Each structure stands twice: as C-alpha cells, then as structure tokens.
Amino acid sequence: MTVILILLISIAILVLGGHVYSTFLARSWGEQPDRMTPAVRLNDGHDYVPTPTPVVFAHHFASIAGAGPIIGPVIAVCYGWLPAVLWVVFGGMLIGAVHDYLATFMSTRMSGQSMATVVRRLLGTGPFVALVIFLVLLLALVCATFLNLSAAALVSLVPCNRLDLDSSQTIFRTVNQQVVIGGIASTSVIVITALAPFVGWLYIKKRVAVWKCSVLALIICAISIVFGLYFPVAVAASTWKVILAIYVLLAAGLPVWLFLQSRDFINVHILYIGLSLLATTVVVAACRGASVPAADALPALDLASGSRAMGFIWPGLFITVACGAVSGFHSLCAGGTTCKQLVSEPAARRIGYWGMVLESVLAITVICVLVLGLRRADYLTDVHPALVGLKTGGNPILSFAMSVGFASHAAFGLPIAVGALGGMILLEGFLVTTLDTAVRLMRYLLEEVWRALFGLAAIEDAQMDPELAPTGADGLLPGAAPSALKTPSILAHVLSHYWVNSGIAVALMLWFSFSSGIMTLWSLFATANQLLAAFVLGLGALWLLRSGRRVWYIVGPALFMLVTTGASLFLLLRKFLPGTGATGAPVGNTTLFGASLVLCGLTLYLLLIGIRAAISPRSRTTHPDRRDGRNPPTSGRP
C-alpha cells in the first residue's frame, strides 16, 4: 500500500495546494476575466485564434509533456524515491507551475509574444540576442539528448529471461537470446510517420470531422504495432540518428500540418491512453498487494548511491529530475502558440499552472511504477551500470519499459513482454514528438535573431501592434536604419530562409548527439533547462516590479533555481574540462566544455543586465503592457 499512499498524498497536495496558491497568484497579478486577450484582439484565423480552453489545454499539455517527466525521475531515483517525490510535488507546485503560469500570463499581456521578444522589449536588443543564443544552445542540447534517447529506445535488446520468455518463442524476434523490443517501436514510428500526412490532409484540407480522424488515428496506432511485431526493424543506433535527423529536417521546413501537427495528432492518442493505463496499472497492482520484496526494492533514501552516480544531492537531484518539477522549455511553448489562443486571462492560469501540475502527477506516477515493478539491482544495471561495476552506458528507457512490464503483469496478469513493449512505444511517442517540435522551435528562434539583427523585427512589431511600437518622424521606429528596414540584404534573405535555419538546427543537434552519451548529455541539458526557468522567473519578477506588484514570492524561486543551476554549471565545467587522466588517457569533453563555458558567459551577462534593470528608477514605473487590451484597467495595475 506504500505506492497508493505516495500517489494519493502527492496528488492531494498538488491539487489542494495548487488551488490555493494559483488563486493567490491570480489575485496578486491582477487577473481580469473581462480583459481582451491577444487571441481576440488580433484574431487573424492563422496564429491568433480564440480557442476553447479545454482544446488549448490539450495542445499545451501535448507540447510540454515530453520524455522529461519520465526520464528525469527514472535517473533521479538513484537518490531514493522519497527525495524525488518531495522535489516533484513541492517544486512542481511552488516553482514549476508558477513559472509556467507566469510565462503564459506575461506573454498574453505582451500581445502574445515569445519570451525572447519580451526580453527585447523590456531590456533591449543585446539581451535579446544573448537569450536567443542561449535558447538555441538549450534546444540543441534538448534535441541531441532526445535523439540519443530515441536511438537507444529503437535499438533496445532485452534478454529473454528478463521478459520471462522462452528463447524458442516466435512472437518477438530474438537475436542471441535477446528480444528486439526496440525494433517493434522502430516499425511503429515509421508507420505512424508515413501515414501522418494522410491524416493531416483529411482534417486540414478536406475538413473531415475530428472524431473520425481520431478513430483513424487509433487504427493507425494499432496497425503500426502489429506491423512492428511481424516486421521489427533493427539497425545501428548511429543509423537511426541519421534517419531521425533527416526526418526532423523535413518536418521543420515543410508545412506544419504535413508531418509535425498530424504526427502529433496521432501520437497524442497513444499519450492519453498510455497515461490512463499507467495510472490504472499502479492503482490495481498496489490494491492487489503486488510489490518487490523489501530486500530487493528501491529504497526510500539512498544518498550514497545517488552521490556516486550523479553527485551530491544538491544540486544533483534538483537538476536531474528536470521537467517533472521545473522546466524552462515550457515557457517557449507558453509564449509560442498557447498565449495566442486564450479566450480569457483565467485561461492562462487553468492552462499554465494546471498543465504543469498534471505533468508533476505524471512524474509521480512514473516513480510509483518504478517502486512497484523494479528491483534495485535491475535498476542500477539499466540506469547506473557503473555502480555495479559495468562499463556499459545507462539506458533509462529500458528501465522504465521493464518496470511497466512487471507492474502490468502484477496488475492484470499480462505477459511482461507486452507491458514492456507498451512502455517502450509510449515513451518513443513522447521522444519523437518532442524532437521534431524542438527542432522547429530552434528554427523559429534562428529566424527571429536574423530578423532582429537585420532590422526586420522592428517593422514586424509596428505592423502587429502600432501602440507598442511608436514611429518616428520619418515613419520608422526611432533609431532604426531606413536602409535596413526598407531593403534587406541578400545575406538577410538567405539567413532568414527556413531550410537554412532547419539545416543549422539539425547540424547542431547531430554535433552534440555524437559528442557524448545519454547520461552525460542529460546533466547539461537539464542544467540549461532549469537555468532558463530561472531567467524567465527573473524576467517575470522585473515585469511585475515595473507594474508596482510584490515580487518576493517570484524572486525566491528564481534565486534558488539560479544558484542551483549555477552550482551545477560550475561542476560540469570541472567535469568536462579537457585534459589527461592519471592513466594517461584523455578525460573531459571539449564540445560540452565549450557549451558549458558559453552558458556561463551568457548567464553572467543576462544576470548583470537584469540586476541593472531591476535597480534602475524605471523599474518601478508603469509598464506599457497595459496597452495590450482594449479595456485596460483603471487601477494602474497590469
């Protein structure tokens, strides 16, 4: 019953505490139900589209709920399940959900603009360029990490005895008494991707009812798994990386409905069904008294193993859990498409805050599945093999899949292989969905920085919202170079082309991907991701301060995340520093050391600019975000 208590108590704290705290935040920020949102005011039927809140919630959650809240807790359980649960619950409620809500609310008040554009308007072009470089580097690390995870999932082999299968069985393909479980997921991904444009054509071009397309999507998911059973694909991990890189290159440049949107539409059915089954499996298995013997179970606290595997619990645990508690990546989604679809300001709270709470619930469910279905020895062998004297790389995906297999067997009597296959397919859907979305976001950011550097962003601001971009006597923005605004150079045209930026994004992804393995990349990706959350919280505090609001409850989490990620960056610099070890063998990692050094430099610059802006007299003046609505408040508050 321990697992049931973990799940119920965690959910109760998240729901009840979240209700009280989110209400306090809404009141403190001056949430106005009758204020006109950018989706209503700038409705163009393309980017700005007023959309029912439940539909936007589904879109937002599908965008933010990648593999992070699964992989992060799996890796972090090496410290014991209790520290991971505490950080997910309280970090998610008091920091992660606050960050997501603030990013959504702030972007909505700023005409539905991205975080980078908000920085440009609040702090100027220099900090904007610095933040975009930071975001591009972060997304490159996200893509590289998830590319390596995808490749590991698609080539995973599991010994027959771990799946309780006879080596002579014919249901799954075997190689040297190992089941090619990843090959089944490989075929499933290929089938879904190949049929995605047809589904997109049906509901975008032919206007076929969404429920009919949903039925077709479920059929495609089932067919893809059946095909995987009969025709599992088995190629080298490096080959899969190249294949996936070609796919995301095309998906990032082609119309969004052709692959990205339609593939996500199909995959979201696997996501929702998988999450429901995962939670049901935990409850049923726990109620039936299923559990790993106490002597073999994952301990509640294991700081010694955690410190050996990932470093001291601070900052190790807080960085490793990543998206299950706090994720800066969510601000990119909030300031990208979500804020452009909201019909009211309360929708920002319902989507931003509660979307993160639901992601924390997912992370807690994953921890419960691990506790319920995995022996400590198997966990260490799969995820942290160095702790048991093995020289193989860690595979947290396999650990999650196996825990789902054992939990499903305990709950419903299903063969272990069936549950493990379900876990693998669920996670692979998360991975590829996040991968192609992140590459497209990286393309957008690259295009945005070229537009800013070549003077095109100023004209776009004026065209979108003249009130926020006042013109000078010559009809241009004050200080803008007329030649840059009127006649963009050939270089500007080339660098602004989507295929050029898609190529840059994919090249950066492959460069980092081939530079290191999953576990090493995860530490740097998670650090950069949490560091972005600290930046966004700090930016939100500055925005609130300029509006005369109290900010102590934002500054505290921002400082905690900044100090935590700063400590992690320092430790990573030492870890990646190139050199020669005691045995004469090279140590460190030149590529990741360079990336860490760039992150440190950008962090110091943005921190100094932020402090200067916060202490300047202008920081306590009323900010012109008030002009974003047709019915601005009369109280002098945003």
Image: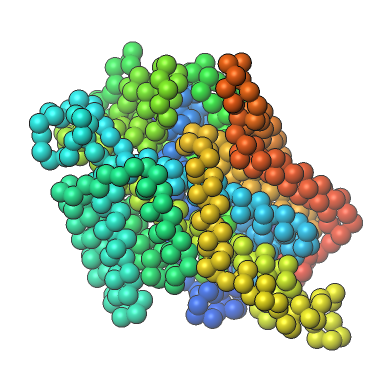
Q: Which residue is drawn at 35% across and 32% down?
A: 399
Vertical arrangement, residue 230 with respect to residue 193, above or below: above
Q: Which quadrant holds residue 148?
A: top left
Q: Can residue 568 be seen in this view?
A: no
Question: Going by the picture, which residue comes out furthest to the top?
Answer: 295
Comparing 637 with 247, the one in front is 247
Residue 416 on image: x %, y %: 20, 33
The answer to whether residue 548 is left or right of residue 313 is: right
Tell me which residue sits at (45%, 28%) in the image.
77
Nearer to me, 508 or 51:
508
In this rendering, is residue 235 above or below 439?
above
The x, y position of residue 557, in whole percent, is: 67, 41
User: Which picture quadrant has residue 424?
Assistant: top left
| Quadrant that contains the N terminus | top left
Q: Which of 117 and 348 is in front in this view?
A: 117
Image coords of residue 152 (percent x, y): 37, 40
Q: Picture coordinates of residue 162 (x, y %)?
A: 23, 26
Residue at horizontal 37%, vertical 37%? 397
Image height check: is 381 above or below 266?
above
Residue at 67% x, 76% y is 490
Task: Quarter of the image for the C terminus: give it.
Answer: bottom right
